[in-house]
Image: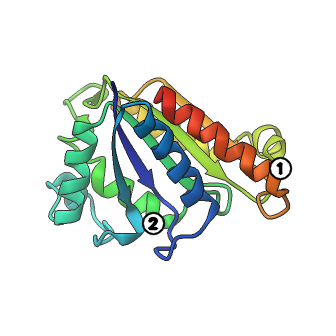
Amino acid sequence: MTRVLILQAHPDPAGGHLCHALADAYAQGASDAGHEVRKLDIARLDFPLLRTEAEFASPASSGDIEQAQEAIRWAQHLVVFFPLWHGTMPALLKAFIEQVFRPGFALDYQTGSFPKGLLSGRSARMVVTMGMPVFVYRWYFRAHGLRGLERSILAFSGIKPIRESLFGRVDAVSDATRSSWLKEMTKHGRRAD
């Protein structure tokens, strides 16, 4: 069985959004299949923004960030749920990533060479909701915000493979379509992929 960490990255701590329902469906499928599941709601964490290179290079000083790093160390598979805002992840998720994916945790910076990823042996799935049609995001915008997260952060840290589930036109879909999306997440949860 797989150790799964669900990172709920919708910035609204009140919940009740499609991202929350998709994460719950994934978690239920994973639990039903016998996988060990932990959840982390980023909107409920307390951490400062990083403002200097010195802050980034130093160890995490927030208890919530240290606990998040420990949860990522524990996990074999990460599932990140977030809404697309301005073509990329919400600022809260970016701030969280900057806090968590620090030197010594995600990357080993070596003089004269590329950093070495320290999170190998883990896989990930990005689950993104958006108002625009998915094909417009993929082909017109080249999914630039998602690609940056996958290539420049996760893969660079050693996480692979990275899969994705994108859901578009979320404000205009029927109840039947929404139900099919939840079933899809439950299936991914069962497979822990």
Q: Give the alpha-carbon distance from disc 2 to disc 1, as whole Å.
A: 24 Å
Kind of residue at badge 1: Pro
Q: Which class describes the residues within 10 Å of circle 1: few (<14), some (14-19), or many (20+)?
A: some
Where disc 2 sits, the SS reads helix
Look at the image and tell me whether residue 75 can be seen: yes
Q: Nearer the viewer, residue 102 or 168?
A: 168
Q: Position of residue 130 (x, y in %)?
A: 71, 56
Q: Nearer the viewer, residue 182 or 91?
A: 182
Q: Position of residue 22 (x, y in %)?
A: 58, 51
Horizontal relation, residue 81 to residue 107: left or right:
right
Instruction: Determine the residue positioned at 65% across, 37% down.
Output: 184
* Colouring of the image: rainbow
Horizontal relation, residue 160 to residue 130: left or right:
left
Q: Is residue 29 above or below residue 48?
A: above
Location of the N terminus by quadrant is: top left
Q: Nearer the viewer, residue 22 or 46?
A: 22
| Most distant residue in the bottom direction | 14
Per the rendering, the mark at residue 133 is 1
Q: Is residue 131 above or below residue 183?
A: below
Where disc 1 sits, the SS reads loop
Q: Position of residue 60 (x, y in %)?
A: 17, 58
Per the rendering, the mark at residue 13 is none
Give whichever of discs 2 and 1 has the lower sequence position.
2
Instruction: Determine the residue positioned at 22% across, 35% down.
Output: 109
Per the rendering, the mark at residue 92 is 2
Look at the image and tell me whether residue 193 can be seen: no
